[in-house]
Image (tube, grey):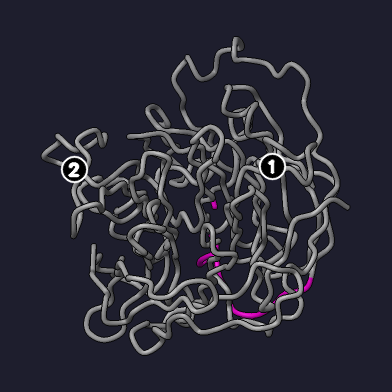
Amino acid sequence: MRLVPAAILTAAMLAACSNGPTPEGEPSAPAVSDHTEFPTERPTPTRPASETSTSEPQPSAPRTPPAVKLFPAFPGLPRFERPIAMVEVPGEGVMLLATQPGQVFVFEERADTSMAELALDWRARTRREGNEEGLLGLALDPRFAENRFVYLYYTAAGGARRSVIARFTAMGSGTELRLDPASEQVILEVPQPYSNHNGGALAFGPDGMLYIALGDGGGQGDPQGNGQNPGTLLGSILRLDVRELPYRIPSNNPFAQRPDARGEIWAYGFRNPWRFSFDRETGALWAGDVGQNSWEEVDLVRPGGNYGWNIMEGAACYRPPQGCNAEGLEPPVAVYPLRDGNCAVVGGYVYRGRAIPELRGFYLFADYCSGRVWALDADATAAGERAEAVLLLESGLPIASFAEDAEGELYVLAFDGRAYRVGAE
């Protein structure tokens, strides 16, 4: 199966629905289609003339990514319950790994490591009533070596349903590293109307700001209209300055001076941007946004951009039969249909490591249910060229997240309980 860049979908397409990025169960790999057909039951979205021009940039020579495999990264470790995020602790030779039920583990970054220590047990404070709730995000402060700050995104237990972004202080180092439970300082709490579409990814950008992904709050079709409402934090990627608590809104945020919008917002119009990342070489922000029931999408996120939900789903109109106006909306850079076992896109990273030189500059992403992993030429896409995402492998794994180490090598976290390293075939 090959994916089609959203900018060149000129036929009318079906609108799209998965209920989130982490459905229960561990599906096996489905059969693979050798082509993609796009249904034509719904009207083509109306786009401004500039977007339908035939003078769009053309790729000089499409690159083909090399064949890759997934290798168990730490085969000696016990299996983790729903691993959701992993980061390398700079200069200490260890990894921190968070699990959705609410634990953080630390272990040596060696292929033969065999023991993981519990760095934080937050299960009593983490709500897991919904399948998409739990401990969902983990990030280290850019100055971690000096301040020892670790940031978590979790669904809070007790009281009203809400997402919490909090800062913890790490004690000790190496495999003795522990997150002090008493050090928690809440940065932001966001009320959640439903148990799904929580987003949950955290990452510091090259500008030192903390970026946070929030879904539209849940419910089929965005019943509260949060995706197209910049007056709410839901359905957005936020950008916060956390050097002073709880946080400051950077003055150059695109909505910082607008009284009708939340100044924390960096971009909006998302349904459930489950995982996002920064290209360590260019600083570009990439996100996978989970669709409704027909289309999954990959976005190149720009400040102030409106990514269309719930006017659009992928590159298709979501509101039939009257059609929709896509003027002013940011189109996705790639979409794929929810069939052949696909259910929810998992955003990954642009590969900038050294182990696979031919893979450099490709953005890797996956589908949770099918376990497929694709590669999109990020350099060509960012330059405005048309690039087609290419199927890299059929893993058969319930892939929930990606991770990147200090050298730019990539890992896949799967709900079979293991972390896998992306390596050459």
Residue depicted at 33% across the width and 85% down the height: 125
Which numbered dot is residue 38?
A: 1
Question: How far across and how far down the image is residue 245, in percent?
Answer: 18, 58
Q: Position of residue 398 (x, y in %)?
A: 68, 70
Camera-near label (1 vs 2) is 2
Tell me how many marks there are. Answer: 2
Q: Is residue 196 left or right of residue 242?
A: right
Q: Nearer the viewer, residue 215 or 401?
A: 401
What residue is pinned by disc 2?
Answer: 261
Query: Dot 1: within a 10 Å radius of its alpha carbon, few (fewer than 14), some, or many (20 or more) residues?
Result: few
In the depicted structure, whether residue 162 falls above or below residue 291: below
| Of pointers 1 and 2, the one earlier in the residue sequence | 1
Magenta span dominant secondary structure? loop
Front residue of 333 and 70: 70
- The extreme left residue here reads 259
- In this view, 363 is above or below 302: below
Q: Are marks 1 and 2 in contact (CB under 8 Å)?
A: no
- Does any portion of residue 174 appear in the rendered image? yes
Give the residue at the far bottom of this rendering.
Answer: 124
Asked if residue 37 can be seen in this view, the reply is no
Quarter residue 220 falls in: bottom left
